[in-house]
Amino acid sequence: MNEIDTSQLLVQMRAMAAAAQGQTVADPTQANGAAGDFSALLKQSIDGVNGLQKNSGKVGNAFVMGDPNVSLAEVMIAKQKSGIAFQATVQVRNKLLDAYKQIMAMQV
Protein backbone atom coordinates (compact mmCIF):
# COMPACT_ATOMS: atom_id res chain seq x y z
CA MET A 1 0.00 0.00 0.00
CA ASN A 2 1.29 3.45 -0.90
CA GLU A 3 1.91 5.67 2.11
CA ILE A 4 0.74 9.28 1.87
CA ASP A 5 3.10 11.88 3.29
CA THR A 6 0.60 14.21 4.95
CA SER A 7 2.93 17.17 5.25
CA GLN A 8 3.80 17.02 1.55
CA LEU A 9 0.12 16.60 0.70
CA LEU A 10 -0.80 19.67 2.74
CA VAL A 11 1.95 21.71 1.08
CA GLN A 12 0.66 20.66 -2.32
CA MET A 13 -2.92 21.50 -1.34
CA ARG A 14 -1.85 24.98 -0.21
CA ALA A 15 0.05 25.49 -3.44
CA MET A 16 -2.97 24.40 -5.50
CA ALA A 17 -5.29 26.67 -3.55
CA ALA A 18 -2.96 29.63 -3.97
CA ALA A 19 -2.56 28.93 -7.68
CA ALA A 20 -6.33 28.62 -8.11
CA GLN A 21 -6.82 32.00 -6.48
CA GLY A 22 -4.15 33.57 -8.70
CA GLN A 23 -1.70 34.19 -5.88
CA THR A 24 2.02 33.63 -6.15
CA VAL A 25 3.11 30.26 -4.86
CA ALA A 26 6.08 30.03 -2.50
CA ASP A 27 8.63 27.30 -3.08
CA PRO A 28 7.17 24.26 -1.29
CA THR A 29 10.59 22.65 -0.89
CA GLN A 30 11.75 25.34 1.52
CA ALA A 31 11.04 24.50 5.14
CA ASN A 32 9.77 27.40 7.18
CA GLY A 33 10.63 26.88 10.84
CA ALA A 34 8.35 29.68 12.04
CA ALA A 35 5.37 28.46 10.02
CA GLY A 36 3.40 27.41 13.07
CA ASP A 37 2.20 24.10 14.32
CA PHE A 38 0.31 21.31 12.61
CA SER A 39 -3.12 22.55 13.66
CA ALA A 40 -2.48 25.93 12.02
CA LEU A 41 -1.32 24.21 8.85
CA LEU A 42 -4.36 21.94 8.86
CA LYS A 43 -6.72 24.88 9.41
CA GLN A 44 -5.09 26.79 6.58
CA SER A 45 -5.48 23.80 4.26
CA ILE A 46 -9.12 23.31 5.21
CA ASP A 47 -9.76 27.01 4.65
CA GLY A 48 -8.16 26.66 1.22
CA VAL A 49 -10.41 23.73 0.33
CA ASN A 50 -13.40 25.71 1.59
CA GLY A 51 -12.36 28.62 -0.62
CA LEU A 52 -12.12 26.35 -3.65
CA GLN A 53 -15.59 24.97 -2.95
CA LYS A 54 -17.07 28.45 -2.54
CA ASN A 55 -15.40 29.58 -5.77
CA SER A 56 -16.75 26.51 -7.53
CA GLY A 57 -20.27 27.33 -6.35
CA LYS A 58 -19.97 30.96 -7.43
CA VAL A 59 -18.71 30.04 -10.89
CA GLY A 60 -21.44 27.42 -11.27
CA ASN A 61 -24.15 29.85 -10.22
CA ALA A 62 -22.81 32.51 -12.56
CA PHE A 63 -22.93 30.06 -15.46
CA VAL A 64 -26.47 28.96 -14.61
CA MET A 65 -27.58 32.60 -14.42
CA GLY A 66 -26.25 33.13 -17.95
CA ASP A 67 -23.13 35.19 -17.26
CA PRO A 68 -21.41 35.54 -20.66
CA ASN A 69 -17.98 35.81 -18.99
CA VAL A 70 -18.18 32.26 -17.56
CA SER A 71 -17.74 29.26 -19.83
CA LEU A 72 -18.71 25.67 -19.19
CA ALA A 73 -15.02 24.74 -19.21
CA GLU A 74 -14.33 27.17 -16.35
CA VAL A 75 -17.20 25.66 -14.37
CA MET A 76 -15.94 22.11 -14.92
CA ILE A 77 -12.37 23.06 -13.99
CA ALA A 78 -13.51 24.80 -10.80
CA LYS A 79 -15.67 21.80 -9.85
CA GLN A 80 -12.80 19.37 -10.47
CA LYS A 81 -10.33 21.47 -8.46
CA SER A 82 -12.68 21.61 -5.49
CA GLY A 83 -13.47 17.90 -5.77
CA ILE A 84 -9.82 16.87 -5.86
CA ALA A 85 -8.92 19.16 -2.98
CA PHE A 86 -11.81 17.75 -0.92
CA GLN A 87 -10.80 14.16 -1.68
CA ALA A 88 -7.23 14.92 -0.64
CA THR A 89 -8.54 16.41 2.61
CA VAL A 90 -10.60 13.28 3.27
CA GLN A 91 -7.51 11.13 2.69
CA VAL A 92 -5.50 13.23 5.15
CA ARG A 93 -8.31 12.85 7.68
CA ASN A 94 -8.35 9.08 7.16
CA LYS A 95 -4.60 8.86 7.68
CA LEU A 96 -4.84 10.94 10.85
CA LEU A 97 -7.60 8.70 12.20
CA ASP A 98 -5.57 5.59 11.41
CA ALA A 99 -2.56 7.05 13.20
CA TYR A 100 -4.72 7.99 16.20
CA LYS A 101 -6.18 4.48 16.36
CA GLN A 102 -2.70 2.95 16.21
CA ILE A 103 -1.47 5.20 19.00
CA MET A 104 -4.49 4.42 21.15
CA ALA A 105 -4.00 0.69 20.58
CA MET A 106 -0.41 0.81 21.86
CA GLN A 107 0.20 -0.73 25.22
CA VAL A 108 2.17 1.34 27.68
Image (tube, rainbow, N blue to C red):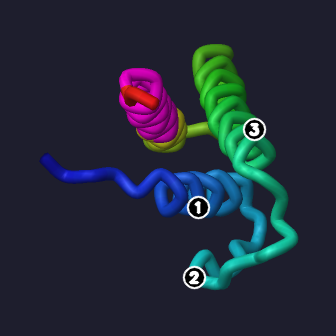
Which SS type dominates the magenta stretch? helix
Q: Quick one: label 3 or label 2, which is nearer the N terminus?
A: 2
Q: Which residues are magenta?
A: 85-105
Give neighbour class at mark 1: few <14, some 14-19, many 20+ (Cα, 10 Å).
some
Q: Locate residue 90: give its quadrant.
A: top left
Q: Quick one: label 3 or label 1, which is nearer the N terminus?
A: 1
Q: Position of residue 88 (x, y in %)?
A: 44, 39
Is 20 drawn above or below residue 39 in the view shown? Answer: below
Q: Position of residue 34 (x, y in %)?
A: 86, 71
Question: Which type of secondary structure does the marked residue at label 3 adopt?
Answer: helix
Q: Residue furthest left?
A: 1
Residue at 77% across / 65% down in the picture?
Answer: 23
Residue at 72% across / 53% down in the picture?
Answer: 21
The CA span between labels 3 and 1 is 12 Å
Residue at 59% across / 16% down in the picture?
Answer: 64
Q: Quick one: label 1 or label 2, which is nearer the N terminus?
A: 1
Give neighbour class at mark 2: few <14, some 14-19, many 20+ (Cα, 10 Å).
few
Residue bearing the label numbered 1: 11
Q: Position of residue 32 (x, y in %)?
A: 76, 76
Disc 2 marks a residue whose amino acid type is: Thr
Q: Are marks 3 and 2 in contact (CB under 8 Å)?
A: no
Question: Which type of secondary structure does the marked residue at label 2 adopt?
Answer: loop
Q: Are marks 3 and 1 in contact (CB under 8 Å)?
A: no
Residue bearing the label numbered 3: 43
The CA span between labels 3 and 2 is 20 Å
Disc 1 marks a residue whose amino acid type is: Val
Q: Say the numbered circle drawn on residue 29.
A: 2
The CA span between labels 1 and 2 is 9 Å
Disc 3 marks a residue whose amino acid type is: Lys
Q: Position of residue 102 (x, y in %)?
A: 37, 30
